[in-house]
Amino acid sequence: MNFALLLFSLLVVTGAVALADRLWFAKARREGEREPWWIEYPKSFFPVILIVFVLRSFLVVPFKIPSGSMVPTLLVGDFILVNKFAYGVRLPIINVKMFEIGRPRRGDVMVFRYPEDPSLDYIKRVVGLPGDRVSYVNKRLYINGVEAPRKPLPDYLNRERIQYSRQFSEQTGEVRHAILIEEEAPPMVPFVRQFPFRDNCNYNDSGVTCTVPRGHYFMMGDNRDNSADSRVWGFVPDENIVGKAFFIWFNFSDLGRIGSFK
């Protein structure tokens, strides 16, 4: 469901009723006569819907983590907030950028519309910027020929998969974050799709190397061997960007996670 479109439709309907009442219906009612329900309810909901629409369209939008691709940074069930204006103000519904405030940086955790189905929102980490040469070879990340620094951390217990994974601290751009590696998993991701600019990528048994096209980004999950990301379905175009994730505001299973991500 396109919630933004639904919200916009409700805003238009309730706003139209409120305006029509102000211009015509209110003048036709006798003094002291009560508003009919089909005017009262839309007028009551209009300011609430307007506030929610403005907040979701231009400021922040909530997002629930649906999968384990960003473990250990984000867990299934985390409710996060997404900064909608971090990368520029966009028109609601059509997502056209009106003016730019900032651009995605390496290491940002970004929510975007899934390139294969824009009705779905995905969340991954920005690894490659336009023009970057990104290599993920033998489970090591290289940006423009330089290996991303990483150091080992204690093994991570994945409670959903009931197994331990190798954990590392990796630096992507200016951001240092944790990643998980499954040593028994092959370095090459399976089920690679055909996608726009597929010729920019070279796949082999050791991994993949891609040159990020102009106006696109290369995204990866922190749970490297359990993430379908740009290695599988390609690059994220700028027009698909939703915003920058910055805060965990709730988790029903673990209240201690509130505020643990920024």
Image (spheres, rainbow, N blue to C red):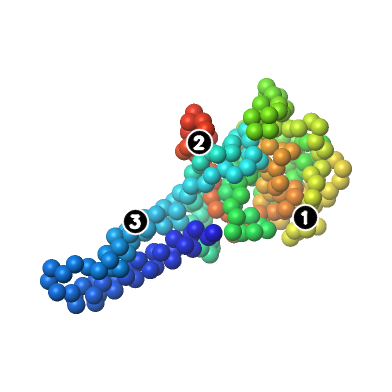
Quote the CA–CA distance across marks 1 and 2. Answer: 33 Å
Whether residue 126 is visible: yes
N-terminal-most mark, 1 or 3? 3
The answer to whether 205 appears left or right of 109 in the picture is right
Q: Determine the secondary structure under disc 1.
A: loop
Q: Residue at x 73, y 53 (%)?
A: 233
Q: How many other residues sit within 10 Å of disc 2, few (<14), some (14-19) or many (≥20)?
A: some
Q: Which mark is residue 154?
A: none
* Contact flag, marks 3 and 2 (Cβ < 8 Å): no
The furthest residue to the left: 31
The answer to whether 243 appears left or right of 224 in the picture is left
Amino acid marked by disc 2: Asn
Pick the residue in front: 145 or 8.
8
Q: How many other residues sit within 10 Å of disc 3, few (<14), some (14-19) or many (≥20)?
A: few
Q: Which residue is labeled 1 in the image?
A: 193
Name the image quarter holding residue 54. bottom left
Q: Residue at x 28, y 66 (%)?
A: 37
Q: Which residue is labeled 3 in the image?
A: 48
Q: How many other residues sit within 10 Å of disc 1, few (<14), some (14-19) or many (≥20)?
A: few
Quote the CA–CA distance across marks 1 and 3. Answer: 43 Å
- Tag nearer the camera, 1 or 2: 2
N-terminal-most mark, 3 or 2? 3
Whether residue 97 is visible: no
Q: Determine the secondary structure under disc 2.
A: loop
Q: Which residue is labeled 2 in the image?
A: 251
Amino acid marked by disc 1: Arg
